[in-house]
Image (cartoon, rainbow, N blue to C red):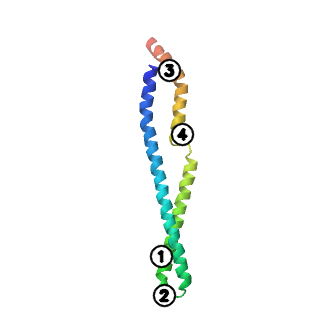
Amino acid sequence: MAEMAVSFALDQLLPLLREETKLLRSIHKGFADLKDELESIQAFLKDADKRAAVAEGDSANEGVKTSAKQVREAAFRIEDTIDDYLIQVGQQHDRGCVHILHKIAHLLKTMVPRHRCYVICARDQGKK
């Protein structure tokens, strides 16, 4: 009986662990892509600042200034989004694989008392 329960638990746990692994990998890839984008933005802004300093007052430079301003604002929005994500992750630290493992450990610790309770309740139901 206990062997079946463990087998069932493993059958339920393994897909969850696989899904959590996929999620963590995709998050890692997403952060790597975001890092690359931010590096490109940083390089663009450095070049735009240099051009603006060299061609001060040039009307053709206005397009570069406008583009740099828009890219800078986008970078700030990205930074705000990252901050929001980090705050949310900090608040939801009980989610994810570690939380699942804690839940499973709790279920295993309480399995025998729950089984005893079930047996007693079933026995009492049979007496009625």
The numbered mark, 3 or 4, whose residue comes first in the sequence reads 4
Place of residue 15 in the rendered image (x, y in percent of width and height, measured from the top left):
41, 37
Q: Which residue is mark 2?
A: 59
For the residues marked 3 and 4, what is the alpha-carbon distance in whole angstroms?
A: 25 Å
Q: Which residue is mark 3?
A: 115
Q: Which amino acid type corresponds to the residue marked 1 in the rendered image?
A: Ser
For the residues marked 3 and 1, what is the alpha-carbon distance in whole angstroms?
A: 67 Å
Residue at image point 49% right, 83% down: 62
Q: Can you tell which of label 3 and label 2 is closer to the viewer?
A: 2
The numbered mark, 1 or 4, whose residue comes first in the sequence reads 1
Q: Which residue is mark 1?
A: 67
Neighbours of disc 1 within 10 Å: few (<14), some (14-19), many (20+): some
Q: Which amino acid type corresponds to the residue marked 4 in the rendered image?
A: Val
Place of residue 24 in the rendered image (x, y in percent of width and height, measured from the top left):
48, 47
Q: Which amino acid type corresponds to the residue marked 3 in the rendered image?
A: His
Q: Which amino acid type corresponds to the residue marked 2 in the rendered image?
A: Ser
Residue at image point 51% right, 70% down: 43
The numbered mark, 3 or 2, whose residue comes first in the sequence reads 2
Q: Which residue is mark 4?
A: 98
Secondary structure at numbered mark 4: helix
The numbered mark, 4 or 2, whose residue comes first in the sequence reads 2
Neighbours of disc 3 within 10 Å: few (<14), some (14-19), many (20+): few
Residue at image point 47% right, 51% down: 27
Place of residue 48 in the rendered image (x, y in percent of width and height, measured from the top left):
51, 77
